[in-house]
Amino acid sequence: MTVTLAADGEIGVTDAMNNTRVLKSEGRKITFRTIPRPLYDRGSGHRDRAGWEPDHADAQPAPGAVLVADLGDGSWTYTSTPDTIYASNNTDTARYLGRFSSAVVADPQRGKVLASRLEPQAKVHALMPWYNTLTPRTPIELKGAPSAIGLWVKGASDWGRVIYSLRDARGERWISVGTKDQWNCDDVHSWSSFNFDGWRYLRFEMPGHAGYDSYRKPGTTCGARRALRQAQGRRAHGTGSWICH
């Protein structure tokens, strides 16, 4: 791939593992080899854009999906309140409450959207995820018997993630990282991770049991399914919030 700078200078080319190479231009041009995994260039000035738009036609809301919330309406904010259940849910993962900011911005594809940003932290915990809870101004009722809930996310292959937190009509809380200390319940397929570029619809099954023998639906036990714009669900019940990390 060759990029053309507005003036001679340098850019940093970063791979998916956050390794950066600094490249200098010659005649305002820089050429580097691409690989199957994402690469990002960081520099100053306007550059010619090369490549293609990602295609996420395979991930769309189900027919008859009902819009239950719009994260771009200005009513969603970060609570900055510790969530001890989420932070200590998995023995192999330490999670830390972090500083996040959010703002409603205009997106050319989706209109008003919620842009989320992880801010610099007072103390660095290497390799450990930061989290914060995104909550609506007032509780949102999901009517009926939900089968799935989804969210439009604009990713940048940065492996951030969304986790949903729901209270059912009886007040029991369901969280999409699974049962405490059960490693195979924490979305082993990474369906809730931002391992893509551009806008993609992330869908995950709501908790529930099948008839007859109360077999638990597998979506919430063997891998719960998961900037930001609209939360959409089917025949939905309860109230919820989103945890971002």
Image: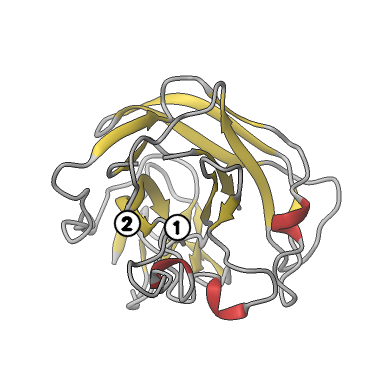
> Which one is nearer the viewer's eye here, 206 or 136?
206
Q: Earlier in the sequence, mark 2 or mark 1?
A: 2
Within 10 Å of the Cα at label 1, are there few (<14), some (14-19), or many (20+) other Cα atoms? Answer: some
Q: Which residue is mark 2?
A: 3
Q: Position of residue 25 (x, y in %)?
A: 43, 59
Which secondary structure lies at badge 2? strand
From the viewer's perspective, is 107 left or right of 8? left
Q: Identify whether 223 is placed above or below 56.
A: below
From the viewer's perspective, is 119 left or right of 241? right
Q: Amino acid at mark 1?
A: Asp
From the viewer's perspective, is 55 left or right of 15? left
Within 10 Å of the Cα at label 2, are there few (<14), some (14-19), or many (20+) other Cα atoms? Answer: some
Image quadrant where residue 46 sits:
top left
Q: Position of residue 104 (x, y in %)?
A: 47, 24
How many angstroms separate mark 2 from mark 1 (CA)? Answer: 10 Å
Q: Point out which mark residue 158 bears.
A: none
Q: Position of residue 109 (x, y in %)?
A: 24, 34
Image quadrant where residue 88 sits:
bottom right
- Which corner quadrant holds the N terminus? bottom left
Q: Identify whether 86 is placed above or below 118.
A: below
Q: Amino acid at mark 2?
A: Val
Q: Residue at x 23, y 59 (%)?
A: 51
> Which one is nearer the viewer's eye here, 189 or 124?
189
Q: Identify whether 45 is placed above or below 15.
A: above
Q: Position of residue 245 (x, y in %)?
A: 61, 53
Q: Which residue is mark 1?
A: 41
The label nearer to you, 2 versus 1, is 1
Q: Residue at x 24, y 56 (%)?
A: 50
Which secondary structure lies at badge 1? strand
Observer able to see residue 25: no
Q: Do the numbered discs 2 and 1 sit on residues whose CB atoms are within 8 Å?
A: yes
